[in-house]
Image (spheres, rainbow, N blue to C red):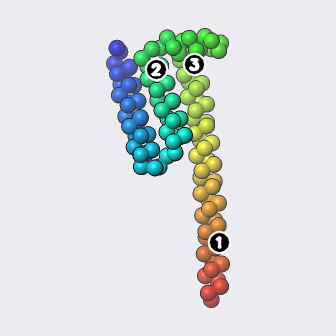
Amino acid sequence: MEPIQIILVIFVFFALSRAYLRYSEGKIKAAEFAFWIVIWVSAIAAALSPKIVGFFSNLIGIGRPADLIIYIAIILLFYLVFRSYVMIDEIDQKMTKIVRELAIGRQKKK
């Protein structure tokens, strides 16, 4: 096993432990936990058996396995940015509603 593979496996187990901790604390839902398990188990599979990535890259017509990893990473990052944007927008709307209700409540007391 190459040193980079060892480092990746250690990192993946750390990331899985963080995901499990968040799940056990109730900070993420079961579906989100399952999503992260799939991501990190896929990362372990790719790190331990690079031929798997080569097989899938050839299957879908991408020349180099590293390109497939980059494409998947970019798609995943765009998805996570979108989810973060939606969550922030929902929080912003809730805060606006609360502030309006507080302002109206204070105005009525005067």
Name the residue located 44 percent from the left edge and 23 percent from the top edge.
Answer: 44
**Which residue in the protein does label 2 denote?**
45
**Which residue in the protein does label 3 denote?**
67
Q: Amino acid at mark 3?
A: Asp
Q: Secondary structure at mark 3?
A: helix
Q: In this rendering, which labeled residue sits more in front, label 2 or label 3?
A: 2
User: In whole angstroms, how far apart are the C-alphas of marks 1 and 2?
Assistant: 51 Å
Residue 105 location in percent, x, y? 62, 80
Name the residue located 46 percent from the left edge and 29 percent from the top edge.
Answer: 40
Q: Amino acid at mark 2?
A: Ala
Q: Is residue 18 left or right of residue 79?
A: left
Q: Earlier in the sequence, mark 3 or mark 1?
A: 3
Q: Amino acid at mark 1?
A: Arg
Nearest the camera: 65 or 32? 32
Residue at the outermost bottom position: 110
In the figure, residue 74 lies in which quadrant? top right
What quarter of the picture does the N terminus occupy?
Answer: top left
Crowding near the residue tagged with mark 2, few <14, some 14–19, many ≥20 C-alpha atoms within 10 Å: some
User: In whole angstroms, how far apart are the C-alphas of marks 3 and 1?
Assistant: 49 Å
Q: Secondary structure at mark 2?
A: helix
Residue 93 location in percent, x, y? 65, 60
Give above or below for 58 relative to 22.
Answer: above
**Which residue in the protein does label 1 denote?**
100
Residue 91 location in percent, x, y? 59, 57
Name the residue located 60 percent from the left edge and 64 percent from the top edge.
Answer: 95
Q: Earlier in the sequence, mark 1 or mark 2?
A: 2
* Number of numbered labels in the structure image: 3
